[in-house]
């Protein structure tokens, strides 16, 4: 899996199963952004895997929600 970590100076810095990889933005679809999951075509190009991207974003939202709920539950109750 190749996931865009950040965009820097004309490149997408991506995290892969084998470490980081720099991909020139000129080789990626327009509008690519941080968090997008990229998939390689048979011809060697790239496309954004929208389903995988959405799934990862929803999982991240759930994890953040769980963290904040736990934190709120651990705080002492304040009397009004």
Image (tube, rainbow, N blue to C red):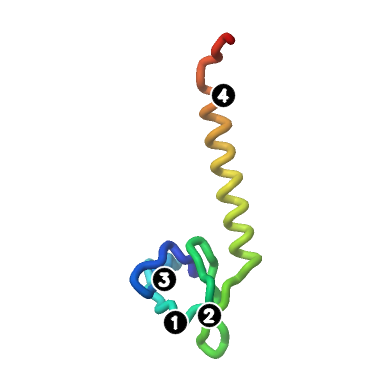
Q: Identify whether 68 is placed above or below 74.
A: below
10 Å crowding of disc 3: few (<14), some (14-19), many (20+): many
Q: Residue 73: give x, y in percent of width and height.
A: 56, 24
10 Å crowding of disc 4: few (<14), some (14-19), many (20+): few
Q: Identify whether 66 is placed above or below 79.
A: below
Cα separation between marks 3 and 4: 39 Å
The residue singled out by tag 4 in the image is: 73
Place residue 13 in its image quadrant.
Answer: bottom left
Q: Residue at x 53, y 78 (%)?
A: 29
In the current view of this chain or complex, which residue is farthest to the right?
Answer: 51
- Specify which label sits upstream in the sequence, 1 or 2: 1
Place residue 39 in its image quadrant.
Answer: bottom right
In the current view of this chain or complex, which residue is farthest to the left?
Answer: 9
Q: Residue 33: give x, y in percent of width and height.
A: 50, 66
10 Å crowding of disc 2: few (<14), some (14-19), many (20+): some
Q: Is residue 1 left or right of residue 24?
A: right
Q: Residue 65: give x, y in percent of width and height.
A: 58, 39
Q: Residue 71: give x, y in percent of width and height.
A: 51, 29
The residue singled out by tag 2 in the image is: 46
For discs 4 and 1, the disc positioned in front in the rendered view:
1
Cα separation between marks 2 and 4: 44 Å
Determine the secondary structure under disc 3. Answer: strand
The residue singled out by tag 1 in the image is: 26
Q: Identify whether 9 is placed above or below 77.
A: below
The residue singled out by tag 3 in the image is: 12
- Specify which label sits upstream in the sequence, 3 or 4: 3
Cα separation between marks 1 and 2: 11 Å
Determine the secondary structure under disc 4. Answer: helix
Near-viewer residue (48 or 20): 48
- Specify which label sits upstream in the sequence, 1 or 3: 3
- Specify which label sits upstream in the sequence, 4 or 1: 1
- Specify which label sits upstream in the sequence, 2 or 4: 2
């Amino acid at each position: 899996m190749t996931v865009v970590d950040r965009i820097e100076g004309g490149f997408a810095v991506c995290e892969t199963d084998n470490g980081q990889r720099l991909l020139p933005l000129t080789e990626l679809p327009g509008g690519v952004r941080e968090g997008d999951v990229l998939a390689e075509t048979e011809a060697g190009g790239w496309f954004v895997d929208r389903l995988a991207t959405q799934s990862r974003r929803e999982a991240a939202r759930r994890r953040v929600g769980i963290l904040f709920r736990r934190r709120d539950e651990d705080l002492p109750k304040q009397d009004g």
